[in-house]
Image: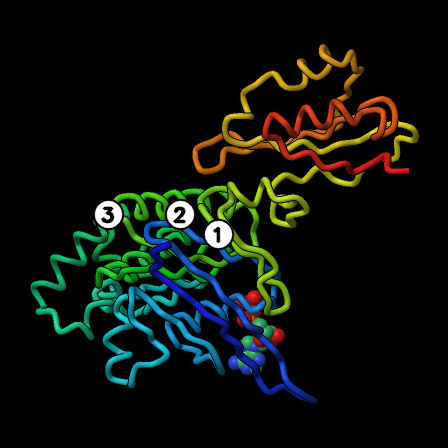
Amino acid sequence: MPTVISVRNISKTFPSAGGATHALSNVSLEVAPGEIFGVIGQSGAGKSTLIRAINLLERPDTGTVTVDGEELTALPADELRRARRKVGMVFQHFNLLEGRTVQGNVELGLEISGASRAERRSRSLEILDLVGLAHKAASFPAELSGGQKQRVGIARALVGRPKVLLSDEATSALDPETTRSILDLIKTINIELGLTVLLITHEMDVVKRVCDSAALLNGGRIQEQGSVVSLISTPGSQLAHDLFPLGEVPAHPGDTVIDVTFSGGTADRPVIAQLARTYCLDVSILGAAIQTIGGNQAGRTRLQLPGTPAVNDEAIRALRGQGMLVEIVGGHS
Ligand SMILES: Nc1ncnc2c1ncn2[C@@H]1O[C@H](COP(=O)(O)OP(=O)(O)O)[C@@H](O)[C@H]1O
Ligand SMILES: [Mg+2]
C-alpha cells in the first residue's frame, strides 16, 4: 500500500514528578495518499504528542517518521527544516499574530520559502480565495469570528503547498455549526488539492463527518485502526461501537438480543422484514443508528428475537450468510 505518512514504532516519554509519563508507546500508523485519517482519543491520550512527532516538533525517543518518502527522523537539522515545508499544520487556538493582517498572517507561511514579495502577495490571495476569505485580506484577526480565524489558520498552513495537512483539534474551540463548516472546508481541500490530511480530535462526530480511516489512541497506545468501513464490520470494535451508539443492552430473559451491522450493499435490503417472514419471527427493533460513511449508508440495528440464541441459530446464520455482522449481545444464558 502506498503511504504518505508512515509512523513506525514511535515512543515518547516525558519526565514527570515522581517518574515518567509514557505519552506514546510503540505507535505505528500508515496514511494513504489523499485520505483523511483521524486519530481519536481522550484528553491526555497522547494525540498532540503524536501529531507533533510527525513533523518532529517533538522528536520521538525511538522509531521512525517518514513523510512523502523522506525519513524525517534520519535528516540533519538543515534538511529537516526544508522537509518540514511538506507539512502544513493547523491548531485549536489558531495561533494568529494579532498585529498582522489576515494576508500578512497567511504570508507568514511563505516567508521561510524564499518566495519574492510579489509571489507571496499573489499566492496568499489565491489561497485566501480558496478558504472564502479574500474579502478579509486587509482585516486584523480581532475583527474575525472563530470560524474565520480558523480559515486563516488553514490558509497559512496551505500557502506553501504542503504534501500533508496536520490538524490538532482544529474545530475544538468552535461551535457545532462552525465546526461543520470547517470540516466541510477540510474535505473540499482534500478533494480539490488531493491533499492528505491527518487530524486529531476527541470528538467522534469529526470522524463520522470526514474521515476515511481512523485510529483510536488510548494511554499512548493505538488500540485499533483501519478504514472506517472495515472497522464498522469488525466484531468488538470500540470505534464502531462509538460510531453507532446503541447504549446498554436491556435485560430480556429468555429472548435473544442481536446487534446487526449493515454496510455497503447490505444497507438497502429489506433484511428485517425478510427475517420476520422467513422464520415467522416476532422481531422487535430496540434501537438503530445510521450514518453515511464514505458515501455509503451504514448502520447498526439492535433486534430482539423471541427465544434463546440456540433457538434463533438458523436465523442468525442466515443474516451472516448475507454479509451482515451479527453480534449476540443479550440472551446468552
Ligand atoms: N512537554 C511535556 N512535558 C511533560 N509531559 C508532557 C509534555 N507534553 C505532553 N505531556 C504529557 O503526555 C501525555 C499526553 O499528552 P498530549 O499528547 O498533550 O495528550 P492529548 O493531546 O491527547 O490531550 C499527558 O500525560 C501529558 O501531560
Ligand atoms: Mg492535545
- Characterize the local packing of mark 3: few (<14), some (14-19) or many (20 or more) Cα atoms within 10 angstroms: some
Q: Mark 1 points at which residue?
A: 174
Q: Mark 3 points at which residue?
A: 130
Left or right of 228 in this view: 256: right
Q: What residue is shown at x 49% (from left), y 66% (from top)? A: 28
Q: In this view, does 204 lie above or below 266?
A: below
Q: What residue is shown at x 29% (from left), y 85% (from top)? A: 77
Q: Do the residues labelled 2 and 1 touch (CB within 8 Å)?
A: yes
Q: In which quadrant will I find the N terminus?
A: bottom left
Q: Name the residue under label 2.
A: 182
For marks 1 and 3 on the same chain, the one whose residue lies earlier in the sequence: 3
Left or right of 129 in this view: 264: right
Question: Helix, strand or loop at disc 1?
Answer: loop
x then y, percent, for residue 198: 41, 58
Q: How far apart are marks 2 and 3 (CA)?
A: 13 Å
Amino acid type indicated by mark 2: Ile
Question: Helix, strand or loop at disc 2?
Answer: helix
Left or right of 291 in this view: 158: left
